Image: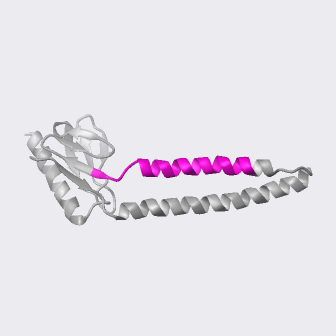
Amino acid sequence: MKEKRYYSQFSYFIKILFIVILLGLAFYFITEASDLIAEKLSRALRKNMVATEYVLNAFVGIILLLAILLVIVRGKPQVTINATTLRTNRFKRDFSEIKSYHKGKGGSEPYIISNDGKQLDIELSWFSKKDRTEIESLIIQQIETANL
């Protein structure tokens, strides 16, 4: 069997775009809140607390940038299948190490059970319907072949 690779649809890019927009909006609202906090502290303590605002904004900004990088670096979901191996972004397993395949039901992701009892999810919701059915049939076929 020749190696086959499947890539997620354009919808994954849209997901990343929405996450970046939401985190940007969160940063805006947090900076507005920190401005109010610094202003109230300045009045209450009769000191200039602008440095507190800047430190809080920098701290939140770093956390949100790390969150954006985590989403982007994690990578687009992809599945690679060859004669002996199933590889996704999260794991790589030989078909001989896989005990069973379970289809997704009611919005849940399909998963495999390895021989050591671990449940490994396969993110097929980002793939086209045609690719999903092809991936599922290949996985089932390769597991049956490996476990003969």
- Residue located at (25% from left, 46% from top): 112
Q: Is residue 129 above or below residue 121?
A: below
- Provide residue 85's location: percent of width, then percent of height: 18, 41
Asked if residue 60 lies in the magenta stretch, the reply is: yes
Query: Based on the displayed image, in which of its 4 quarters is residue 33 positioned?
Result: bottom right
Total numbered labels placed on residues in the image: 0
Which region of the structure is painted magenta? 54-78
In the rendered image of this protein, does residue 128 appear above or below residue 78? Answer: below
Magenta: main secondary structure: helix
Horizontally, is 71 left or right of 97 in the view?
right
Residue 48, given in percent of the width and then of the height, sits at 86, 51
Q: With respect to residue 116, does 134 lie above or below? A: below
Indicate whether residue 18 is drawn in magenta. no
Q: Position of residue 99 (x, y in %)?
A: 20, 41
Q: Picture quarter containing residue 145?
A: top left
Which residue is depicted at the point 92% across and 51% down? Answer: 46
Left or right of 60 in this view: 111: left
Taking the spot 11% from the left edge, 40% from the top edge, the residue there is 146
